[in-house]
Every structure is written in C-alpha cells, then in structure tokens.
Image (cartoon, rainbow, N blue to C red):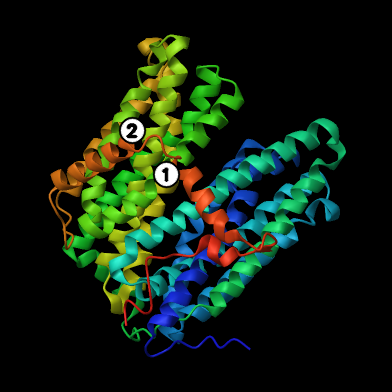
Amino acid sequence: MIKLQPSDQLTNAQIKTGLHLILKDGLATETMSTLTAGTFLVAIALYMGASNVQIGILAALPTFTNIFQLVSVWLVQRFNNRRTITVIGAFFGRIPLLVIGTLPLLFSASASVSALIYILSFQYLFASIAGGSWHSWMRDLIPQQILGSYFSHRSRLMQILNVTLSLLIAMSIDYIKEHHPAHEITAYCCMFIISGVTGMWGVYALARTPEPKSKPINDNIVKLFSKPLTVPNFRKLLVFNSCWIFAFNLVTPFFSVYMMKTMGLPLVYVISLNIVSQLSSITSIKLWGRCSDRFSNKTIIRICAPVYTGCLMAWSVVGIMSPAVLFPVLVIMHMLMGASNAGITLALQNIGLKLAPAEEGIVYLVTKNIVTAVFSATAPLAGGLLADFFTSHFVIDLFGRGQWNLLFMTGAAAGVLSLKLLRSVQENGERDKKLLVAELQHTFKKKLRNRHQLSLLRRWFYHRSAVVFKKGISFDFDNLIQYKGWSDKKNN
C-alpha cells in the first residue's frame, strides 16, 4: 500500500525517482488534454448539437475554475500534505472523463450537451484544487539548479506526444466520418474513456512521487493572499505576467479564424501551420531550458517576447502579400511564434517558482495563477468585442484584408507595453541579454556547420530507439522518457 505522508528530508535517489514519475504524470496529463480538450472537445460538443453559447462556456471553464485553487491553499494549511491533496484532487478530476464517455448512451443529444458542461465543471474544479498543491510540491521537489532544463525536457516530451497523438486521432476521426459515420459518436466516447484510464495511470505515478515536508502555514487565509501583493518584486511580476497574458490571448485565438474566413486558407493548411508551430516549440525548448539555468528567465523573456510581438505586427501586413509568398511567410511566422512562445511559457513558469518563498510557495503561486487567470479569461472576449467594433466603426480596408489587422496591432501594442513592465522585475542571477544573444548565435552557427547531420527530432528518435527495444522485442518506456540531467551519485 502506498503511503502518502511527506518525508522530513529526501535523498538524492528519491529525488531522481520523483523526477521520473513526474514525467510519467505529465505524459498522462497531456494525453488527457489532447483527447478531451481543444479541437476534439469542440467536435464532440458540436456533434451533440451545442450552441455557440455552450461552446463559449466549455472554453471558459478551465480558466474560471482556477478560483478553486483557493481551496487548495486552505487544504494545505489544514493538513500540510500536498501529495495527498494532489492525488485525491486528480483522482476525482479524472473520474468525470470516464462518465462523459457514457453520456451519448444515457441521454438524448440535446441533454448530453448540458450534461457534458455540468460534468466537465467538476473535472476542472478538482483539477484546479490538485494544481494548486502540485505547483507548491514541485517547487520543493525539483532542485533549483535544474529547474529550467527539467521542465523543458518534460514540456518537449509532452509536445511530441501532443503532435503525434493529434495527427493520429484527427486522421482516424476523418476516416470514421467518411467510411463509418454512424460510429463517430462511439469514437468520441472511446477517446474520453481512454483519457480517463490514462489519467488514472498518472494519478498512480503521482501517488508514488515523494514529497518533502513543508513548513506549516498558520496565518489567516485572508492575510496569506494579501501578502504576495505587498511584496514589491512579486507584485511587479504579477503586473507584467497579467499584461502579457492579456496581450497573448487577445489575438492568438483568432489566428485560425482569420486564416480560414478572411484569407480563405483550407483547413489542412491551418492545421499544418499549427503543427509547424508545435514542432518549432519542441526543437527549441531544450535550448531555452539550458539558457534558463545559465542566464535567468527574465533574459529569455527579453529576447522571446519582442520576437512574438514582431510576429503580431507581421499579421497586420500578411494580407497584402501575393499567394506565392503568403504561405512561406506564414510558415516562418509560425516557426518564430512557436519557438518564442516556448521560451516565454517556460520562463514565466520558472520565474514564478523562483520568486515564491519556499515556506509559502503555494500561496504565492496560487495568487499568481488566479490573477493571471482573470486576464486570460477576459482577453478572448475583449478580442472578439474589439473585432466587432473595428468592423462596424471602420469602413477602410486596412492592408486589403479587413479590420482583423487593427486587432493584431492592438495586441502588439499591449505586448510592447508589457515589455516595459518587465524591466522593473528583479531576478537573482540575471545576466546581460547580449550574452544570451551571443550564445544563441554560437548555437545557430554550430548547427549550420553540422547541417549534414540528422535533424534534432530524427536524432532524438534514433537515439531513443536504441534503448526502446531490448533484444528486438522488449519495449523500455522508462529509458525512452528518462531525464538525464540529475544523477544521484553525482549529487551525493
């Protein structure tokens, strides 16, 4: 039987085991997200006859339920056992996926949509409770000196799984629609059931992950959440993070809409461009993780954020390009957005972990998540309202492609403003941006000199394949995903 009590002190061997188990939970979580969120969730909701309002509610649920991370803080304060809270929250958050898989068999089509929203709200509620304690747990479990490289390795594995699984499922769904349309709902049900079973495997990995005992939190919960807002440096991080996430979500959800409806690109082109962005993120995130450990997270943001903002500006002018150059330019833009967004996301996660005090980490991280969630949820709504406003109040045809361009320029302006707010944030170990630029230039030139070698993804595949099969038949999953940046012998 697994004991969920925290340990007074972890050995290096326990830390190494924990690092590996968190990778397994990450892959299980990514499988759940790929199968039951985003495009596939919209597809099953539309098949059930969901209205636009119901689709909007489904999109808003994950963000709005972040408020329940407050419950996570209260539970940690009450019981001081983050692993138990995370495991129980994750367990109850993954049961609804199994229930949803049976919905079409139990309800009519119209009733199923309402039931889908109702049951998913419980999934996101418990996931928020588990997420609050999980972030604090990781803050104490993962050694600070490998924080960047470890999370970049974890994110890279999750993104590779996402791309592979998305392509496989999308092709399978299209085949079923064309050749066996009567079984389409069965396929969606199977996706939810598979995601629920995989999620339970992740819960088992979490239950086996060791937890270092944290210092009890005895302050009043109201004072606890007001404290991070009184710390000047952390408050400056919240302001920057909120402004950036608002600029990001103001326009990003509308890229696909703009390409399909205004530019008239086929759906397959849009999907291909999204995959290009994900592959760019996969191939660059290892570099960002290494740079995070060497140069600081703020330095990475100071390089990546201007690149992403520049791409937002470029969206305002791509409409005037000829068809011959349009798609190549979009490919380059998606490559730059994928690589830069990977660096920004990793750096924002790591800088929050670094600035949160160890003894009150959960309070600081939950405060950060809740504050940024408000801006993340309101930004797409504001973007849609702005797009409608520009369309109804401006008769000019800016750059030949309508009023979406004004929205993209607004998002770029918000991004520039957030970069000015970053200057006041202080991070230990911050180094001159020029040093990181020189490092990136050196890495790029080195890759050019070795251009005759296999690409990063192919080298990764062939290297891992050497350890996947033992004697040609035994699949070694642990060796396939293991993180090699931490050695219990080296760190004794």
Using the rendered view, name the quadrant where residue 293 is placed.
bottom left
What amino acid is at disc 2?
Gly
Query: Closer to the camera, 154 or 180?
Result: 154
Asked if residue 279 is positioned above or below residue 17 in the image, the reply reads above
Q: Position of residue 327 (x, y in %)?
A: 47, 19
Q: Position of residue 354 (x, y in %)?
A: 27, 66
> What element does badge 1 sit on?
helix
In the image, residue 249 above or below residue 193: above
Q: Nearer the viewer, residue 288 or 442?
A: 442
Q: Nearer the viewer, mark 2 or mark 1?
A: 1
- The answer to whether the residue labelled 2 contacts the one labelled 1, judged by CB atoms less than 8 Å apart, is no
Q: How far from the left and from the top, in percent, is residue 435?
A: 15, 47
Label located before the other in sequence (2 or 1) = 1
Q: Secondary structure at mark 2?
A: helix
The one nearer the camera, 143 or 306, is 143
Q: Quadrant of the N terminus?
A: bottom right
Relative to 67, 438 lies left or right: left
Residue at left offset 67%, top offset 39%: 170
From the image, tell me which residue sits under label 1: 283
User: Which disc, if any, is residue 210?
Assistant: none
Q: Is residue 150 shown left or right of residue 209? A: left
- Looking at the image, is 66 positioned above or below residue 90? above
